[in-house]
């Protein structure tokens, strides 16, 4: 069995009691030595209790609710990247929409020299038509912004499932802090726009996006506004 102790899986959470326990068990079972970092923004359900039951065996829970720092998905991921103690990290959702099985391939690509590895969605199942139209238009616009700036790109610029070399992301953030929309949702996009196209090596792994396993979606109109701000900064 391969050893995954050089990788940390960062999982931002907000009320994910329906799936977080199952997801952590799955990661620990599949990947020997893996580190898991739960970045929680003050879940009001049992998320915290469930995570703490795993003890300190490679699973850490960060309660951001008491912190004065900005709350948000991007803010939580960026904090997680700074708390990561391993050479590599992977960000994934806590609602089982991101299949844990492909982490093996993602880590392989990072070991092979990729600075960033993006899990690329093959299909989005069961999305309402209006959500598909809005999503497609925003993708074209955001992609065009990257092309116009000669910035790095990949076939799924809005993927929430990605990873990379911890040092590469930390250094980029240090030089581009003000370009990150911390309350936003598109943390990968904020990083891509800060790299030049030939500056970094990007790898891709394909997967099918699944429906949420219980819990509620937090995606909404305010995140579209945050994204427009991202494109402009
Ligand atoms: N820490 C933190 N996590 C968040 C926040 N908003 C969402 N999350 C988590 O980020 C992940 C993605 O959020 P989702 O609501 O599933 O977003 P989505 O996958 O685009 O939307 P659905 O397809 O409807 O599930 C989940 O693990 C959420 O619990 C937040 O403000 N802070
Ligand atoms: Mg989700």
Image (cartoon, rainbow, N blue to C red):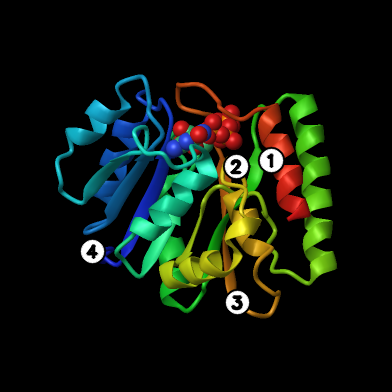
Residue on which the image places disc 1? 226
Residues tagged 3 and 1 counted as in contact (Cβ below 8 A): no
How many angstroms separate mark 2 from mark 4 (CA)?
35 Å
Q: Nearer the viewer, residue 114 or 205?
A: 114
Residue on which the image places disc 4? 1
Q: Quarter of the image containing the C terminus?
A: bottom right
Residues tagged 2 and 4 counted as in contact (Cβ below 8 A): no
Q: Quarter of the image containing the N terminus?
A: bottom left
Q: Earlier in the sequence, mark 4 or mark 1?
A: 4
- Mark seen at residue 185: 2
> Where does residue 46 sit, x and y in percent of width and height?
29, 22
Q: Earlier in the sequence, mark 3 or mark 1?
A: 3
Q: Is residue 212 above or below residue 113?
A: above
Image point (49%, 40%), residue name = 70
How many angstroms separate mark 4 from mark 3 (CA)?
30 Å
Q: Nearer the viewer, residue 21 or 82?
A: 82
164 to the left or right of 232:
left
Q: Earlier in the sequence, mark 4 or mark 3?
A: 4
How many angstroms separate mark 3 from mark 1 (CA)?
26 Å
């Amino acid at each position: 069995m391969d050893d995954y102790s050089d990788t940390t899986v960062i999982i931002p959470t907000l009320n994910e009691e329906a799936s977080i326990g199952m997801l952590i068990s799955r990661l620990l079972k599949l990947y020997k030595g893996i580190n898991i970092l739960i970045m929680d923004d003050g879940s009001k359900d049992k998320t915290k209790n469930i995570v703490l039951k795993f003890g300190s065996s490679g699973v850490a829970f960060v309660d951001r609710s008491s912190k004065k720092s900005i709350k948000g998905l991007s803010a939580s991921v960026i904090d997680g990247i700074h708390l990561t103690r391993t050479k590599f990290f992977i960000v994934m959702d806590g609602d089982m929409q991101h299949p844990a099985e492909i982490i093996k391939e993602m880590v392989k690509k990072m070991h092979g020299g990729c600075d960033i590895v993006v899990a690329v969605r093959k299909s989005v199942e069961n999305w309402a038509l209006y959500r598909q139209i809005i999503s497609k238009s925003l993708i074209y616009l955001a992609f065009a912004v990257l092309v116009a700036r000669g910035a790095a790109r990949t076939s799924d610029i809005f993927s929430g499932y990605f990873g990379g070399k911890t040092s590469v992301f930390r250094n980029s953030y240090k030089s581009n802090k003000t370009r990150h929309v911390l309350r936003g949702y598109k943390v990968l996009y904020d990083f891509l726009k800060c790299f030049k196209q030939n500056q970094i090596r990007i790898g891709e792994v394909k997967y099918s996006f699944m429906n949420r396993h219980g819990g509620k979606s937090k995606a909404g109109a305010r995140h579209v506004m945050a994204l427009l701000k991202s494109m402009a900064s």
